Amino acid sequence: MYELTGVTKQYRRGQGRVDALAGVDLTVREGDRLVIQGPTGGGKSTLLQMLGGLDRPTSGSVVFDGTDLATLSERRLTAVRARTMGFVFQSFNLIPTLTAQENVETALVPLGTRAAERRRRAAEALESVGLGERAGHLPSELSGGQQQRVAIARALVKRPKVLLADEPTGNLDESMRDEIVELLDGLWREHGLTFVMVTHDSAIARRAPRLAILRKGQITLKENHQAAEAL
């Protein structure tokens, strides 16, 4: 699925340079559930952006299904993201003037899906996250947890190979955090996804069968066999 080799990412800061990633090697197998944890500024979100083709490395390769994302044109990269990757972010990123149903449908527009099919699949996706009865509501009429469920439905409606989540519970309280994590785990199993999540939350990290710790741009991998067996 993914093979990262020698991935670096450098940013300019004033007259100096910041190494967000410093030679990361990482393999993510198809069907993996990987959690990335580490301190603020340690490179977690940067690594997720590399996996999602949202940013390019300064050096190294990010091979996804045999293709190095770093070498693709923007047009081809956009097409790969649209077809194969679903994204969930901390801030939900819903369009405030669209209903839950319409927000979910937006993920299918770039794929050229016909309107009737978009409506059907969006309704099914909302049902799968427990929001079938709220399809006609605007984001402002939904709780934070419900908005994140809409965002998850939007990510899954196009039936991606990979689900990438950046602090998906960061704006939620503890009880809602647990609900969203359980939902994501269930959807991962049901759909056979490859699932990569960035989090600062140790309670979430302890549940991960594979854990990547990022500190100062460098990665340490840990296998949690007990968590894997529980899943």
Image (cartoon, grey):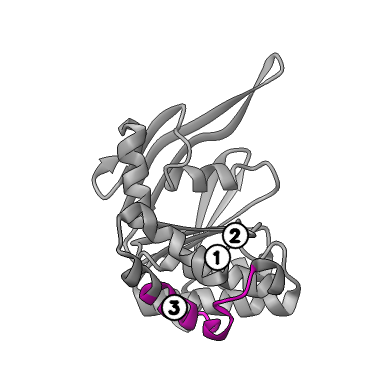
* Gap between marks 1 and 2 measured at Cα: 7 Å
Q: For the point 44% across and 78% down, which residue is it? A: 123
Residue labelled with disc 1: 151
Residues in magenta?
A: 120-138
Q: Is residue 207 magenta?
A: no
* Gap between marks 2 and 3 measured at Cα: 16 Å
Quick check: can you spot residue 177? no
Residue labelled with disc 2: 94
Residue labelled with disc 3: 123
Q: Dot 3, how many residues are within 10 Å of its Cα: few (below 14), some (14-19), or many (20+)?
A: many
Give percent across and percent down for residue 3. Answer: 34, 46
* Image vertical order of residue 90 relative to residue 127, above or below: above
Give percent across and percent down for residue 157. Answer: 40, 68
Which one is earlier in the sequence, the residue at label 1 or at label 3? 3
Mark 3 lies on a secondary structure that is: helix
Q: Amino acid at mark 1?
A: Ala
* Gap between marks 1 and 3 measured at Cα: 13 Å
- Given residues 79 and 72, the one toward you in this image is 79
Q: Amino acid at mark 2?
A: Leu
